[in-house]
Image (spheres, grey):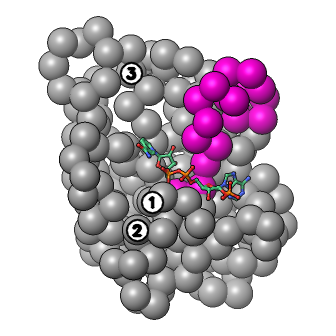
Amino acid sequence: MQIMITGANGQLGQALLRILPGAVGLARPAVDITDADAVERAVAAHRPDVIVHAAAMTDVDGAARDPDLAYRINGLGTQAVALAAARHGAVVAYVSSNEVFDGQAGRPYTEFDPVRAINPYGASKLAGEPRGSRAGAAGTSSTASSNWPTSVAAYAWSATRSPTRPLSTTWLTRSRA
Ligand SMILES: NC(=O)c1ccc[n+]([C@@H]2O[C@H](COP(=O)([O-])OP(=O)(O)OC[C@H]3O[C@@H](n4cnc5c(N)ncnc54)[C@H](OP(=O)(O)O)[C@@H]3O)[C@@H](O)[C@H]2O)c1
């Protein structure tokens, strides 16, 4: 099974590459996810079964200063990944954010809870959720535990067994906001 990891130089990407030997990592500047053609070329070249989409603009303050850029990367960049995946039959594991919730629930959130992004970063990550899931993908989110890369890797593995599971039936319970 071929696994591709976007955001390969990031915190999650690096952790995943350590625990998923043989995975292909994509990173800037070779592949900028806002360049749909570059994403398509990379996916066509490697033909992954699963893409763990860990690339994102994660600078919360930067996203507040430049919400358009956050949307381009986290929303439209995710769309580019999802569409390339769909064209080549890959499943996408999309890592979302606790910041798609407002934190008012007073209990741990589940994937069935209504979303209300608390800031432009959360809004941009939320924009990526349906775009990611359009490829028959699964949305994930961060967890409070220190082994969340392992959880994401486990999901990526299991996704190949049930690649058509929709966003709402994934393994994950979203984190406490
Ligand atoms: N860390 C957390 O606590 C946490 C919590 C919730 C959700 N998440 C989500 O988990 C995922 C991974 O987070 P992380 O902590 O690993 O973030 P990170 O360390 O900031 O890594 C993100 C990576 O994405 C890359 N990237 C940004 N824009 C890109 C673009 N246009 N094209 C290609 N690559 C681009 C960055 O590349 P450069 O190295 O070139 O900047 C960076 O290597 C993200 O989706 C994030 O939203 C993380």
- In primary-sequence order, the first of circles 3 and 1 is 1
Identify the secondary structure beneath mark 2: helix
What residue would you read off at disc 2? Answer: 15
Residue 116 in which image quadrant: top left
Q: Is residue 3 visible?
A: yes
Residue at image coords 77%, 61% = 32
Q: Nearer the viewer, residue 139 or 161?
A: 139
What residue would you read off at disc 3? Answer: 101
Magenta residue span = 54-71
Residue 168 in which image quadrant: top left
* Tag 2: amino acid: Ala
* Tag 1: amino acid: Leu
Report crowding for label 2: few under 14, some 14 to 19, many 20 or more residues within 10 A (C-alpha).
Answer: some
Mark 1: is the Cβ under 8 angstroms from ligand 1? yes
Mark 2: is the Cβ under 8 angstroms from ligand 1? yes
- In primary-sequence order, the first of circles 3 and 2 is 2
Disc assigned to residue 12: 1
Q: Locate the N terminus by quadrant.
A: bottom left
